Amino acid sequence: MRLLYLGNNWLGLKVLEHLRDRGEDDVAGLVIHPADQRKYVEEMLDVANLSDDCVFDGATLGDADVRAQVRDLGCAIGVSVLFDYLLDPTFLGLFPDGVINLHPSYLPYNRGQYPNVWSIIEGTPAGVTLHYVDAGIDTGDIIARHEVAVDAVDTGETLYRKLERAAVTLFRENWPAIRAGRIERTAQNDEGASHRTRDVETIDRIDLDRTYTGRELINLLRARTFPPHRGAYIEVDGQRVYLELSLSCDTKVGHG
């Protein structure tokens, strides 16, 4: 299958590696993030091994010339993994088999950004989903999804890593059926919520004069623990003091 790949970060790299290792698909074009937003892109460029005219900056997809170049690649499908740019209907229409997206949440829960954070904060199901891309944000028909357990010792970081691994597995298991056209589409319902990047700003400041339940405070701290990234903080004498939470379980030892 001839495809356009739109990706970023470790997960984007791993899915691209899987497509290459299968040896059955032609990654004809690669869309990457601008320099200040890209992660693992050098590795992705090495894996894709494409000429410069087949590599596109995601910020330019609205340009008519770029769209013409993408159209001329003759791709049947687009595959999006952690690609942060909205794709409008005109762009989506370039692909006869549509564009699919691998999202690290259990849709319809936690559309948009930081699903690992919001599953902990709001107590919503965590998981990974393959779905078709439409004009909304993670609102397209679901192809497959898998729920991931949120353990009491999970932080934003550990849950994120679990979701990454689960997402790679979900893609590997379902890609053969997708490329063969042997899938069922399930429309999303009205449950769940959508979050933008700036939404975490509304929870990061811990008010020292406010009353929290123990559950609320612990969930906030662990959800925003993802070193070296800064998350939750308090303000003391005009300074921000950032907080992280370390969690561990008792190890049960049997007695003879």
Image (cartoon, helix red, strand yellow):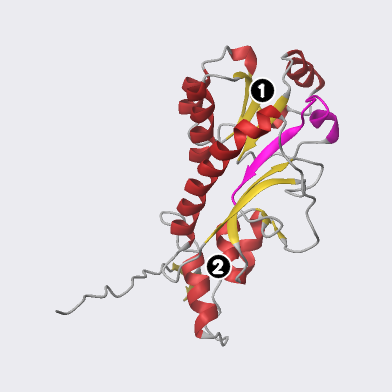
Vertical comparison of 187 with 202: above or below:
above
Which circle marks residue 133 in the picture? Answer: none
Tag shown at residue 120: 2
Q: CA distance from mark 2 to mark 1?
A: 35 Å
Secondary structure under tag 1 reads strand
Q: Position of residue 184 (x, y in %)?
A: 75, 42
In this rendering, position of residue 211 left or right of residue 159: right
Quick check: 60 left or right of 25?
right
Residue found at x 45% / y 27%: 43
Q: Residues within 10 Å of mark 1 (few under 14, many from 20)?
A: many
Task: Indicate the quadrant containing the C terminus: top left, top right, bottom left or bottom right.
Answer: bottom left
Residue 135 horizontal side relative to residue 14, left or right = right
Which amino acid type corresponds to the residue marked 1 in the rendered image?
A: Leu
The span shown in magenta is 89-104
Which residue type carries mark 2? Ile
Q: Is residue 70 above or below residue 61?
A: above
Q: Residue at x 80, y 58 (%)?
A: 189
Where on the picture, by quarter, is residue 74? top right
Q: Is label 2 in a helix, a strand or a loop?
A: helix
**Residue 66 is inside the magenta segment:** no
For residue 151, side relative to residue 183 (left or right):
left
Q: Earlier in the sequence, mark 2 or mark 1?
A: 1
* Residue 3: image tag: 1
Vertical relation: 224 (above or below) 182: below
Which is closer to the viewer, label 2 or label 1? Answer: 1
Could you tell me which residue is drawn at 44 percent across and 71 percent down?
152
- Residue 191: x and y in percent read 76, 64
Q: Residue furthest left?
A: 256
Give how far across and how far down residue 228 sits, in percent.
41, 54
